[in-house]
Amino acid sequence: MTAAYRPREPLAAIQSAVLAARAAVAEPGPARRQLVGGVLALALFVTVVSLWVYIAGNPGVDFEIPLRAASRWASGGQPYLASSFAETTGPTLPFLYPPWVLPLLAPIAALPRILVMAIWLVIVGAAAVWTCRRLSVPWP
């Protein structure tokens, strides 16, 4: 490592990338078209993949696994099922979290799944907006 090289913090690197993107968007030209086209292509890709996962029937599977284990635990059953280790996909995969998570998830597991998923999506969306604001990403 040379004396002139100073590692930057990750946040500073991201902020400098955002400033470069702002400069590219501010001036009309090929850089702006490429940036807008890339962002639109990424948004389209994420939308198509998200719809494909949703249509496949496994939305929120990573959230469903602990909720099912908490439901089993709350009803007096075994949250850690040995048979679930034979599964390869879906909400019947094994619950791998520590036991102290179960009492925290039991009240949530009693709620309707559609309500829980809607609240979770709102929380994730709020976190995404907060992150964009924190990084000074240009906002329409």
Image: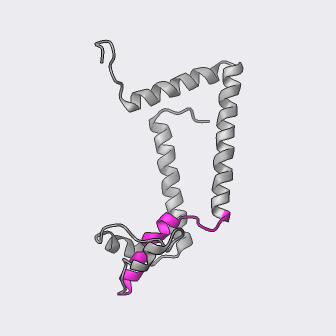
Residue 136 left/right relative to 47: left
Instruction: Please tell me which residue is depicted at 65% across the width and 53% down the height of the picture.
Output: 49
Q: Quadrant of the N terminus?
A: top left
The location of residue 127, given as percent across then percent down, is: 47, 49
The location of residue 122, given as percent across then percent down, is: 52, 57
Instruction: Please tell me which residue is depicted at 67% across the width and 58% down the height of the picture.
Output: 52
Residue 37 position (above or below residue 115): above
| Observer-nearest of 107 and 5 | 5
Q: Main secondary structure of the magenta part?
A: helix
Q: Is residue 56 magenta?
A: yes
Instruction: Please tell me which residue is depicted at 68% across the width and 38% down the height of the picture.
Output: 40
Residue 38 position (above or below residue 27): below
Given the current orientation, which residue lies at the most extreme front position? 86
Instruction: Please tell me which residue is depicted at 69% across the width and 52% down the height of the picture.
Output: 48
| Observer-nearest of 61 and 128 | 61
The location of residue 42, given as percent across then percent down, is: 64, 41
Q: Which residues are magenta?
A: 55-76
Total numbered circles: 0
Residue 136 left/right relative to 44: left
| Observer-nearest of 95 and 46 | 95
Q: Quadrant of the C terminus?
A: top right
Given the current orientation, which residue lies at the most extreme bottom position? 76
Given the current orientation, which residue lies at the most extreme top position? 4
| Color style of the picture | one colour
Residue 31 position (above or below residue 73): above
Q: Is residue 125 magenta?
A: no
| Observer-nearest of 94 and 48 | 94
**Residue 43 location, quadrant:** top right
Residue 50 left/right relative to 90: right
